Image: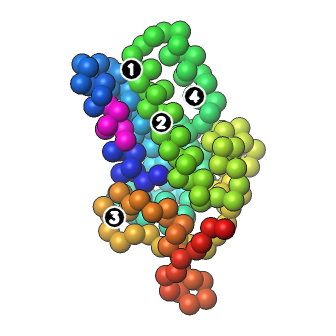
């Protein structure tokens, strides 16, 4: 799902908690539903070696499917099992919010990102599975033609079409459409 899609869904869920003056719960929902994507930035810098920290360059890197490593520590079933147990036993509203927001985030990722890979998207969200594949994005997500990023930062941020829909034809260099069968 696009970052803007995560922002909108997270804001809606957090607004419900805030309307009931559940501020810690709302903060947790924001952290789990939207800020969880900070691990993409960590991968971009630490594992893909990029130094261009402009938001547009970072977003284009992902929109065009150019990531080399998919470590994504915060996007893992294993972490959510541990956090769910901690939230259940502690009853901490912020942690319950984080788990709820994060699971909402992962569910939306499964729905939207599942269209982008020929491999199991459910397995992709296992840290152990990614580690077994040495975090190599091409092995985990499949290799396809480069995707054409939407024009402009906000179009990419709030893009609703799956990024795989617009691709560059490797023979002609023109934008085309890939149909899923």
Q: Magenta stretch: residue 46 in it?
A: no
* 3D distance between C-alphas at marks 1 and 2: 15 Å
Residue 104 - label: 2
Q: Quickly name the residue at label 4.
A: 80
Label 1, secondary structure: give it: helix
Confirm whether residue 35 shows in the render. Answer: no
How many marks are shown on the rendered structure?
4
User: What colour scheme does the image use?
Assistant: rainbow
Q: Earlier in the sequence, mark 2 or mark 3?
A: 2
Residue 152 location (% of width, % of height): 32, 68
The residue at the point 53 percent across, 13 percent down is 88
Residue 44 location (% of width, % of height): 49, 53
* 3D distance between C-alphas at marks 4 and 2: 12 Å
* 3D distance between C-alphas at marks 3 and 1: 32 Å
Q: Earlier in the sequence, mark 3 or mark 1?
A: 1
The magenta-colored residue range is 9-14
Q: Earlier in the sequence, mark 4 or mark 2?
A: 4
Against 144, residue 59 (above or below) is above
Q: Nearer the viewer, mark 4 or mark 2?
A: 2
The residue at the point 54 percent across, 66 percent down is 164
């Amino acid at each position: 799902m696009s970052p803007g899609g995560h922002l909108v869904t997270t804001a809606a869920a957090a607004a419900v908690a805030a309307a009931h003056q559940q501020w810690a719960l709302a903060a947790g929902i924001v952290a789990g539903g939207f800020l969880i994507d900070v691990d993409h930035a960590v991968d971009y810098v630490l594992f893909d070696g990029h130094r261009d920290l402009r938001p547009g360059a970072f977003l284009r890197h992902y929109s065009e499917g150019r990531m080399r490593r998919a470590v994504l520590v915060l996007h893992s079933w294993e972490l959510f099992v541990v956090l769910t147990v901690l939230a259940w036993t502690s009853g901490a509203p912020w942690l319950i919010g984080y788990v709820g927001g994060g699971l909402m985030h992962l569910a939306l990722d499964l729905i939207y990102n599942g269209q982008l890979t020929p491999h199991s998207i459910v397995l992709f969200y296992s840290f152990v599975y990614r580690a077994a594949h040495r975090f190599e994005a091409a092995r985990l997500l499949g290799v396809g033609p480069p995707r054409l990023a939407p024009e402009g930062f906000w179009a990419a941020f709030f893009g609703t079409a799956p990024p795989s829909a617009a691709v560059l034809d490797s023979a002609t260099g023109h934008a085309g459409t890939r149909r899923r069968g």
